Image (cartoon, grey):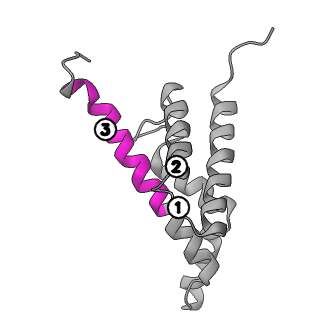
Amino acid sequence: MTGPVSEQAVTTSVLDELEKLVQHAQKENVPLEIDPQRSQLFELFVRAEGAGLVDEEEGPLSADEICRQLADRAGLTEAARLSTVQQAKLPAEHLSRMRVLWSMMRMWMEWTYAWKRWSEFHGEKE
């Protein structure tokens, strides 16, 4: 019998799955905004939200934090820093990954906003 899954385990698992999804979208040049990518992304959002990890201010799976974590994992943070220091363009591969991350981040932020305001439009009290 296993106990409840820790917050860190869920966070790591969701980040790992998001990273795979972003890599797939970039490699196959498919937008995250259409299925099956959109559905997979939304399922990860629901899982993270259900675990209480999506809070915009301090959640380990807020849109900002996910973007930061995945950018670090992909070397984008360092690539952007070097690009600035060297006053050079960001390599195409990094730019492509960044665009996919921005797309994912935008959708995650929209879902966070809609989820937060759901009760306001469905007659439920917070």
Q: Is 106 one of the magenta-colored residues?
A: yes
Who's the residue at 56% across and 44% down the image? 40
Where's the C terminus, which quadrant? top left
User: To which residue does mark 2 refer?
Assistant: 65
**Left or right placement of residue 33 versus residue 17 in this view:** left
Q: Return the residue found at the far right.
A: 1
Q: Position of residue 78 (x, y in %)?
A: 64, 72
Who's the residue at 49% across and 37% down the image? 59
2 or 3: mark nearer the eye: 3
Q: Position of residue 79 (x, y in %)?
A: 63, 76
SS under mark 2:
helix
Of helix, strand and loop, which mostly describes the magenta segment?
A: helix
Who's the residue at 45% across and 60% down the image? 103
Q: Which mark is residue 101?
A: 1
Tag 1: amino acid: Leu
Where's the N terminus, which quadrant? top right
What is the tally of numbered marks visible in this picture?
Answer: 3
